[in-house]
Image (spheres, helix red, strand yellow):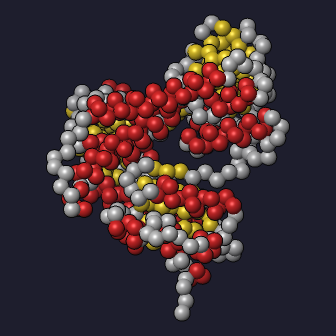
Amino acid sequence: MATDLDVLVLGSGQAGVPLAARLAAAGRRVALVERGDLGGTCVNAGCTPTKTLIASARAAHVARTAGRLGIRAGEVQVDLGAAMDRKDAVVARWREGVRQRLEAAAPRLRLVHGPARFVAPREVEVAGERLAAPVVIVNVGARPAVAPVPGLDRVPFLTSTGALALRALPAHLVVLGGGYVGCELAQLFRRFGAGVTVIDPSPHLLAREDEAVSAALEEVFRREGIRLALGAAAEAVEGGAGAVRVRLAGGAVEEGSHLLVATGRRPNTDDLGCDAAGVALDRRGFVEVDARYCTSAEGVYAVGDAAGGPQFTHSAWDDHRILFDLLLGRGRRTRDDRLVPHVVFTDPQVGVVGLTEREARARGVPFELATLPYSAVARAVEVDEPDGVVRVLVDPRDERILGAAVVGAEGGELVHVLAALMQAGASARALVDMEMAHPTFCEGLQSAVMTLERFALRP
């Protein structure tokens, strides 16, 4: 058994790789275990492949609709195979970058390939070898969850992973799930030329967001020809390859050639042997951790998707920064001391940070809501991308920003202006008083906040 280790990291995701590399650079003897491809979900089946394909789909959409700007582009033809080849090349590039970073940390960092399973506290078995260390970091990630819909086990279906590897365009893609993943893939395949239907039991897409945010995206989806079957749960699935049928509560039936199940994610802890390590899981299988990433087992920490909480790459990367400092005895931040923005990379983008209006009302938090349609932003009109809305919640007591949502062109970038002000604890007046270049999308943030009486221009 290898016992000459200081740290054992399970998983090469966006927390595991930088933790392993930095701890090795700090003098620790580290082993990093990975059962699959280097890079975790983000590189292999999440951010990198989806955003690369979304860029191709947007190019097709812009070319197809260029007539609105006085440009005749002719017939648009999508080469799905070429788009997938480009995606694969970008994935391979980032994966190679991970490999090079880990190799640069040798000899203090050892990479071990194979599935790990706890066999005792702070001890795992990998491909017949046992590894033990006083510090173990669990970064095993998550994978698509499959909703328990009757008949689904007898019908061929895609998860997000399979959809990102298609080489032939579906005639009609039926998407179960109107969350972040379902919405991004629905629009992507629609812009590639597939018929698309999105089914979700909630009355709106992106059910966690405020209704006004969802409504802005739904308007665009319907205009682009995406059928929305909302407010009715899927009760049964039937059919076979090339012909699937989904029966909804109330009796309606949605049909298509392919079925994509995008109904959430589940942690990769079911075969990790957490019982043997004394690591407690919650009812959904996520590792239970405190604010400092400590599990129920001494010396064992969990970060990233498997630790529950926000299922975002940037959250996992921030997990690594916080835990690294804590392990070196110099950290003050904890898992609870952070602001977590998120972006849905639809078109228009949906960028959100802080409290939603619904959350503020539920918690009894006083707020003033500033809102501005994107069509009132000069830049949005000039580039003919007027879809969306800016919403900012301001605390009436100290004028600090409580939360914001930006639905619109570059909304994922713009929301970080507001996030920076929130992180700094600055007043929304800082946004009002700054001089902004014209014409920019950022002016819309300022104009939105100035719709509040306290910030309005007066004679």
How many numbered marks appear? Answer: 0
State the residue lying farthest toward the bottom.
459
In the rendering, at what x and y percent does residue 226 appear? 28, 50
Q: Is residue 101 left or right of residue 42?
A: right
Q: Depth check: 288 or 247 in front?
A: 288
Q: Is residue 46 above or below residue 68?
A: above
In the rendering, at what x and y percent does residue 94 appear? 50, 31
Q: Is residue 297 left or right of residue 69?
A: right
Q: Residue at x 69, y 61 (%)?
A: 424
Q: Depth check: 272 or 415 in front?
A: 415
Q: Is residue 173 above or below residue 300?
A: below
Q: Is residue 416 above or below residue 199?
A: below
User: In this orientation, does residue 255 appear?
Assistant: no
Q: Is residue 243 left or right of residue 295?
A: left
Q: Quadrant of the N terminus?
A: top right
Q: Quadrant of the C terminus?
A: bottom right
Instruction: Write down the quadrant of residue 388 in the picture.
Output: bottom left
Q: Residue at x 60, y 82 (%)?
A: 454
In the rendering, at what x and y percent does residue 363 appear? 63, 63
User: In this orientation, does residue 313 appear?
Assistant: yes
Q: Residue at x 54, y 85 (%)?
A: 457
In the rendering, at what x and y percent does residue 192 appear? 27, 42
Q: Is residue 339 left or right of residue 179?
A: right
State the residue lying farthest toward the left.
75
State the residue lying farthest toward the front.
437
Instruction: Write down the quadrant of residue 216 in the picture.
Output: bottom left
Q: Residue at x 33, y 32 (%)?
A: 84
